[in-house]
Image (spheres, helix red, strand yellow):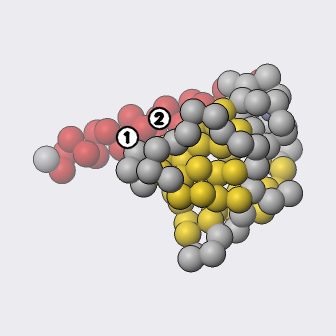
Amino acid sequence: MIIQHRFVEQIPRELEDGILYISMEFGSAMHKCICGCGYVVVTPFSPTDWRLIYNGETVSLEPSIGNWSSECKSHYFITNNKVRMSRLFNEKEIKEVRKIDRQNKKKKKKERRKKR
Ligand SMILES: [Zn+2]
C-alpha cells in the first residue's frame, strides 16, 4: 500500500484517503487511517512524538503509528511512502505502550527544565 505525501501550509478540513498531509507551519502531519475507517490521525513532530524523514522524494514517519483511540486499532509503519501493516496490539500491550509514552514525555519535560 502506498501513501502519497503532500506538503501544505494549512491542513485542509476534508482529508483525502491515502494522502499524508504535512504542515511544517504547524509541525505536524495528518492523514486518514489507512484501513479506511475514516479516523483522522494526527502525528505531531517532536522529540517525544514523531520524526519526519524526507529524502527529497519520499517520506517516512518514525516511530510506527498506532491508532489505539480508533475502533480499528490499526498499527502500521510509513516508510518511504509505503505502508506496512504491523500486528495488532492487545489491550495490555496498548496500555504498556501508552505508559512508556507518558514516561518519556515526563522525562523530556524535566530535561528541558534543567537546561534553562
Ligand atoms: Zn482504521
Q: Is residue 112 visible?
A: yes
Q: Residue at x 25, y 45 (%)?
A: 112
Q: Position of residue 19 (x, y in %)?
A: 69, 51
User: What amino acid is labelled 1 in the image?
Assistant: Lys
Q: Residue at x 39, y 35 (%)?
A: 106
Horizontally, residue 76 falls left or right of residue 108, namely right
Crowding at label 1, few (<14), some or many (≥20) Cα neighbours within 10 Å? Answer: few
Q: Position of residue 79 (x, y in %)?
A: 71, 63
Q: Residue at x 52, y 42 (%)?
A: 11
Mark 2 and mark 1 residues within 8 Å of each other at the beta carbon: yes
Foreground residue among 10 and 116 = 10
Q: Position of residue 13 (x, y in %)?
A: 57, 33
Crowding at label 2, few (<14), some or many (≥20) Cα neighbours within 10 Å? Answer: few
Is the residue indicated by label 2 positioned so its CB lies within 8 Å of ligand 1? no
Q: Position of residue 32 (x, y in %)?
A: 71, 39
User: What amino acid is labelled 2 in the image?
Assistant: Gln
Is the residue indicated by label 1 positioned so its CB lies within 8 Å of ligand 1? no
Dividing the image into 4 quarters, which one contains the N terminus?
bottom right
Find disc 2 in the rendering and name its residue.
Answer: 103
Q: Residue 99 lies in what quarter of the image?
A: top right
Q: Quadrant of ligand 1?
A: top right
Q: Residue at x 74, y 38 (%)?
A: 33
Horizontally, residue 23 falls left or right of residue 80, namely left
SS at mark 1 in the image: helix
Q: CA distance from mark 2 to mark 1?
A: 6 Å
Foreground residue among 95 and 69 = 69
Find disc 1 in the rendering and name its residue.
Answer: 107
SS at mark 2 in the image: helix
